[in-house]
């Protein structure tokens, strides 16, 4: 099949052995690449009961067949491993350019296993692969690491962890290209546990031959035109970025505020996409091969840096009761520098602020920077403290909101699912997204089935956000399509303009493996079920498909005109969802696994 | 009186908030037209926080929010 290099690079850090193996193309036909194929490879490679931070866990960096091709957004890669946060499947996605470079260097995936006895980094230049000493890089921030390893070289991309990953924070991200992150599930801690600081990829190649060059060029141009012509991907996203959602989600009374104690933020417009565009925005930013350009490039003092996304803005503003955009830009910057996931970090700080409000965390614990709602100094200083492991409280915060709140005997204040913090959209006012959070295989996550599109943005059609009817099928369809997109190596944002048939046409022309849109959705369904099987074997219980108690029992206050009185009706939606998936008590039946060709 | 809040580029030359006199039978599309916004450019219409359409008839004292097509995630 075209668009696969057919090669996996295997690095054993314990034995220092480096080898190149053939990619199993039959598996690629079933699980595509990226998220799907990475999960399958991990399941086949590890003992499912392995301690995620032990030498026996493995971490897989894997591109999709379309990564590196010239179709719009064709660059993304996945970091797949067993999550140290919750012991379930971790697959974190990133843009930038590193995924394309991995493909250009001649590989589809890198499997890293074992543990180095001292800090190392991988230096890859096409078929030259060397494990190098990283002692002098250890403790460096992400930007410092990138600057040192890039020097003045061209055609080089640096994937790395910051101090948070070195310190095994369960919120640690894998960074690349300075401000892009495979953020969630603590994947950075797995790298840190292996003493692996960075993976440098250098190559002068920039081509991925497709099966039918003419047809591929045609569908790539068509899809780029659809993205440009669509009002969201051609207008809203490039102009305002994802931050434009601040005002919209607040307007429907579903912007979680003060660690989800409220659902409206009266100062939302101070930190909105509109305000960003009028103040700190310098220009929009693009990942490799992207024609959308949703990224925000902003000014911080004299520095031009990557700006916050919607979920980051939410976490550091409404959730922490802070309307200081400059402070939020700085907190976002320091998350990138420390290599911390911005959703988990901001949500954990908001949980800490509620614990401070309720007297669990004291001024003495806070060492001069009170974790008080509204304190903008706190979000900047505590991000640095978490990254560096400043004191006992910082080390506790670095383990995420669940372990933090559990430590004080009140896990219900952790707004998380399967220990992963849920972002930015209140599941009481938006019913479908709550079902998605509860059933997301990696835990509380919005981008596994982004029903905000139909429930709020009216794309492709408007559905009623407050009802449960039809949400089970909706969530399943979004989750399946997303699993396929994440496996192809494309950006989820393309789905505002493209549907399953368009993706199938691009994949078919690229690889020579002809499929329909329906078949692509079935591949997504297969991937979703495989992830669920991973979790089942790793010890997940059906009770973990749930939401924080606050969302199920505490109705949104009645003075919230748009969503007052609502709770999540997960009790109604979850059984319908299991039925739609062919699952019993949260897990696929043997018939379902056979139907999808998993067993 | 109807309070109309505008978002994204609808704010250009119009400001963030506009107050419109109420009359019986006034529809969302009447206000949109009076604001010189193309009907096709309006993507999300909220009345008191609930999704509505251009044809929705408004009541006195309601809040109307208008958004062009935008997205995120």
Image: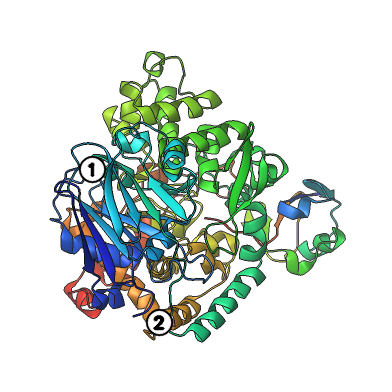
Q: Which residue is mark 2?
A: A518
Q: Position of residue B71 (x, y in %)?
A: 59, 59
Q: Is residue B55 visible?
A: no
Instruction: Name the residue nearer the viewer: A209 or B19.
Output: A209
Locate residue A374: give its quadrant. top right
> Dot 2 lies on which element?
helix
**Chain-order first, disc 1 or disc 2:** 1
User: From the viewer's perspective, is residue A393 above or below residue B2?
Assistant: above
Q: Position of residue A72 (x, y in %)?
A: 54, 68
Q: Position of residue A450 (x, y in %)?
A: 47, 60
Q: Chain of mark 1?
A: A
Locate residue B50: give its quadrant. bottom right
Instruction: Name the residue nearer the viewer: A571 or A14.
Output: A14
Q: Is label 1 or label 2 in front?
A: 1
Local packing at callout 1 (Cα closer than 10 Å; few below 14, some 14-19, many 20+) is many
Quadrant in which the N terminus of chain A appears:
bottom left
Instruction: Name the residue nearer the viewer: A507 or A176.
Output: A176
State the count of labels. 2
> Residue at (44%, 53%) from the top-left corner?
A156
Q: Is residue A330 visible?
A: yes
User: From the viewer's perspective, is residue A38 above or below residue B8?
Assistant: below
Which labelled disc corresponds to residue A194? Answer: 1
Q: Chain of mark 2?
A: A
Local packing at callout 2 (Cα closer than 10 Å; few below 14, some 14-19, many 20+) is few
Which labelled disc corresponds to residue A538? Answer: none
User: From the viewer's perspective, is residue A57 above or below residue A505?
Assistant: above
> Residue at (55%, 43%) from the top-left corner?
A308
């Amino acid at each position: 099949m075209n668009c696969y290099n057919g090669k996996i690079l295997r690095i054993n850090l314990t034995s220092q052995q480096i080898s190149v193996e053939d990619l199993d193309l039959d598996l690629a036909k079933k699980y595509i690449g990226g998220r799907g194929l990475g999960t399958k490879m991990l399941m086949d490679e590890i003992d499912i009961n392995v301690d995620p931070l032990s030498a026996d866990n493995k971490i897989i960096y894997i591109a999709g067949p379309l990564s590196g091709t010239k179709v719009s957004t064709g660059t993304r890669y996945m970091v797949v491993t067993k999550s140290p946060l919750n012991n379930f499947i971790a697959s974190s996605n990133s843009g930038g350019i590193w995924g394309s470079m991995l493909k250009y260097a001649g590989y589809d995936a890198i499997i890293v296993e074992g543990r180095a006895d001292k800090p190392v980094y991988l230096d890859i230049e096409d078929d030259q692969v060397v494990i190098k000493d990283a002692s002098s890089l250890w403790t460096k921030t992400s930007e410092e690491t990138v600057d040192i390893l890039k020097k003045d070289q061209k055609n080089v991309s640096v994937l790395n962890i910051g101090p948070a990953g070195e310190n095994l924070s369960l919120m640690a991200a894998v960074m690349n290209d300075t401000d892009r992150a495979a953020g969630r599930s603590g994947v950075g801690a797995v790298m840190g546990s292996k003493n692996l600081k960075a993976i440098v990829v250098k190559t002068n190649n920039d081509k991925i031959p497709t099966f039918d060059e003419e047809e591929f060029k045609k569908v790539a141009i068509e899809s780029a035109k659809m993205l440009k012509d669509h009002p969201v991907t051609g207008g809203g996203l490039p102009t305002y970025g994802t931050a434009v959602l601040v005002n919209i989600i607040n307007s429907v009374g579903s912007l979680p505020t003060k660690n989800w104690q409220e659902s409206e933020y009266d100062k939302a417009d101070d930190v909105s996409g509109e305000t960003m565009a009028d103040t700190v925005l310098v220009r929009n930013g693009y990942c490799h091969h992207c024609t959308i350009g949703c990224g925000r490039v902003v000014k911080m003092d004299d520095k031009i840096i990557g700006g916050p996304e919607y979920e980051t803005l939410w976490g550091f503003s409404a959730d922490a009761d802070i309307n200081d955009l400059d402070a939020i830009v700085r907190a976002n910057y320091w998350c990138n520098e420390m290599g911390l996931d911005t959703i988990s970090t901001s949500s954990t700080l908001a949980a800490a602020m509620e614990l401070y409000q309720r007297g669990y965390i004291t001024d003495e614990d806070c060492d001069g920077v009170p974790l008080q709602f509204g304190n903008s100094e706190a979000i900047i200083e505590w991000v640095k403290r978490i990254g560096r492991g400043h004191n006992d409280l910082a080390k506790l915060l670095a383990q995420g909101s669940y372990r933090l709140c559990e430590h004080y005997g009140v896990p219900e204040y952790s707004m998380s699912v399967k220990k992963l913090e849920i972002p930015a959209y209140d599941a009481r006012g938006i019913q479908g997204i709550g079902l998605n959070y509860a059933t997301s295989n990696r835990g509380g996550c919005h981008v596994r089935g982004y029903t905000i599109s139909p429930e709020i943005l009216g794309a492709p059609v408007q559905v009623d956000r407050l009802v449960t009817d039809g949400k089970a099928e909706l969530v399943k369809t979004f989750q399946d399509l997303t699993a396929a997109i994440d496996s192809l190596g494309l950006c989820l944002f393309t789905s505002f303009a493209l549907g399953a048939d368009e993706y199938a046409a691009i994949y078919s022309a690229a690889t020579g493996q002809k499929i329909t849109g329906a078949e692509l959705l079935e591949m997504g369904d297969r991937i979703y079920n495989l992830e669920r099987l991973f979790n089942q074997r790793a010890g997940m219980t059906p009770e973990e498909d749930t939401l924080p108690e606050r969302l199920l029992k505490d109705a949104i206050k009645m003075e919230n005109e748009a969503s007052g009185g609502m709770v999540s009706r997960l009790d109604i939606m979850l059984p319908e969802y299991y039925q739609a998936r062919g699952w019993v008590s949260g897990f696929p039946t043997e018939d379902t696994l056979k139907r999808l060709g998993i067993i | 009186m109807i309070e109309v809040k505008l978002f994204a580029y609808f704010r250009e030359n119009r400001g963030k908030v506009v107050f419109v006199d109420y009359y019986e039978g006034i529809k969302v599309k009447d206000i949109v037209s009076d604001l010189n916004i193309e009907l096709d450019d309006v993507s999300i219409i909220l009345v008191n926080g609930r999704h509505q359409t251009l044809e929705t008839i408004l009541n006195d004292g309601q809040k109307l929010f208008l958004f062009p097509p935008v997205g995120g995630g």
